[in-house]
Structures are given as structure tokens and as C-alpha cells.
Amino acid sequence: MHDKMALRIVQNGLITLKDCVVEEKDRLEHANSFKDTAKVLRMTRAGVAWLAVGCARGAYENALQYTTKRKQFGKPIASFQLIQNHLVEMLSNLTAMQTMVYRLSELQDLGQLQDEHASIAKVFCSLRTRDVVSRAREVMGGNGILLEYNVARFVADAEAIYSYEGTKEINSLIVGRAITGFSAFV
Ligand SMILES: Cc1cc2nc3c(=O)[nH]c(=O)nc-3n(C[C@H](O)[C@H](O)[C@H](O)COP(=O)(O)OP(=O)(O)OC[C@H]3O[C@@H](n4cnc5c(N)ncnc54)[C@H](O)[C@@H]3O)c2cc1C
């Protein structure tokens, strides 16, 4: 697939399987149903939650550095109250995300990771990342849309992270099912 606006380094392709028969000898061990595929998604979703954190951290660090150097009205813009408010919101989001994914990995190490854990982290982190990258872009003014300042790339990547490995809606339904006992899928 060409002309993607985000995650351009990731090679994506649409694979269509038609009249495809897989012989028993070629079947992956332990792959019996979609439930087994879901086990893989559980792990990769947790990884995408971490990816969101990395994206947010990159945007925050670039924005912080920029605001301490950029001067307006004779002062670094980082000395203005409203800019500091953005930086604090970014760091708060980032800290909450980091705490969540750290716990996610602890659960993984303990062998207790469930679908809903990975889903809630993926939803939360990708939502918060959108907020962080948007603030980072904002405090950089016009330079925020230039690729050379890095933040524009994080803004674009946050959009892909938001949708892949399960959208916010679908991951929310997984968590909703776990906490209520009712499946809204059917
Ligand atoms: C960078 C990138 C990498 C990807 N890598 C892979 C990969 O390796 N393997 C792979 O198989 N796929 C991959 N995908 C595809 C990705 O998983 C899908 O794009 C994603 O799951 C959303 O599916 P869709 O695009 O078909 O959207 P749709 O299913 O058409 O959804 C559109 C909108 O409708 C909402 N929606 C759909 N159904 C419901 C419902 N029942 N209730 C409420 N809302 C609903 C969705 O949440 C979304 O907001 C990748 C996508 C990207 C962008």
C-alpha cells in the first residue's frame, strides 16, 4: 500500500486468500480457532499500547526542548504560564500511560494477562497519545507542521496507532464485556 500518511516505515499489504486449502501438515501447532488468534492479538495489542507511549514521549520531549529554546516577547516560550500548562498536561498523560503499560508487562510476566487488560491499555494509551501529540504540535506553532521538528511525524503516527490492533470501539467492547458480563458484539 502506498501514499500512507502515517507509520510510513511499516510495509502494509492487502492479502486476499481465495480457494485456499491448507494441508493438515502445514497447520500451525495449537492454531485451532479464532480464540488462538486472539491470544496473539492480546500480546501484539499490549505492544501497541507501549508503542503509543513511545510516540507520546517522543512528542513531549521534542516539544519541551523546543519551548525552552524558542523565544517570543524576549523570553523562552517555556516561561509562559499557558505553555507550561500544556507541558504539564502532556507529562501527566505520559506518566499515567507509562504506569499502565508497566503494570501490563508485570501481568504478562506473571502469566495473568487477559484480553481486557491489553484492550484497556491500548484504548487508554492511544487516546492519551492523541492528546499529547496535539499539544506538542500546538506549542510549536507553525514549526509544528514541519517534518524537520519531528513532532509532525508523531502526530501522523498517533492516528495509525489509534486505529490498528483494534479500534477504540472494538477494544472498548472487549473491556465492556469483561466488566459487565454482557457481550455487545452479538
Ligand atoms: C498501520 C496499520 C497496520 C495494520 N496492520 C495490520 C495487520 O498486520 N494485520 C491485519 O489484519 N490488519 C492490519 N491493519 C488493519 C487494522 O487492523 C484495521 O484497519 C482496523 O482493525 C480497523 O478495521 P477497518 O479499517 O476495517 O475499519 P472498519 O471495521 O470499517 O471500522 C470503521 C469504524 O467503524 C467502527 N466500527 C466497526 N464495527 C463497529 C461496531 N460493531 N460497533 C461500533 N463501531 C464499530 C470502527 O471502530 C471504526 O471506528 C493495519 C492497519 C494499519 C493502519
Image (tube, helix red, strand yellow):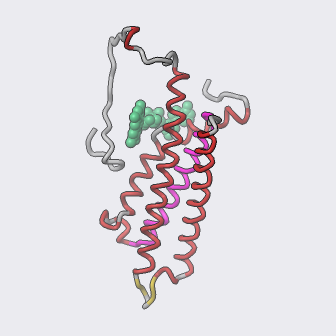
State yes or no: residue 180 in magenta.
no
In front of the other: 97 or 4:
97
Specify the quarter for ligand 1: top left
Range shown magenta: 114-141
In front of the other: 80 or 63:
63
Report whether residue 174 is seen. Answer: no
Residue at the (50%, 18%) spot, across then down: 30
Residue at the (50%, 33%) spot, across then down: 41
Q: Is residue 127 left or right of residue 72?
A: right
Where is 22 relative to 170, above or below?
A: above
Q: Name the quadrant containing residue 13.
A: top left
Q: Is residue 58 left or right of residue 111?
A: left
Where is 1 relative to 78, above or below?
A: above
* Residue 2, x across and y down, in percent: 26, 42
* Residue 156, x across and y down, in percent: 39, 54
Where is 63 relative to 39, above or below?
A: below
Residue at the (52%, 17%) spot, across then down: 33
Q: Name the quadrant containing residue 111.
A: top right
Residue at the (37%, 11%) spot, across then down: 22
Q: Name the quadrant containing residue 35.
A: top right
State yes or no: residue 130 in magenta.
yes
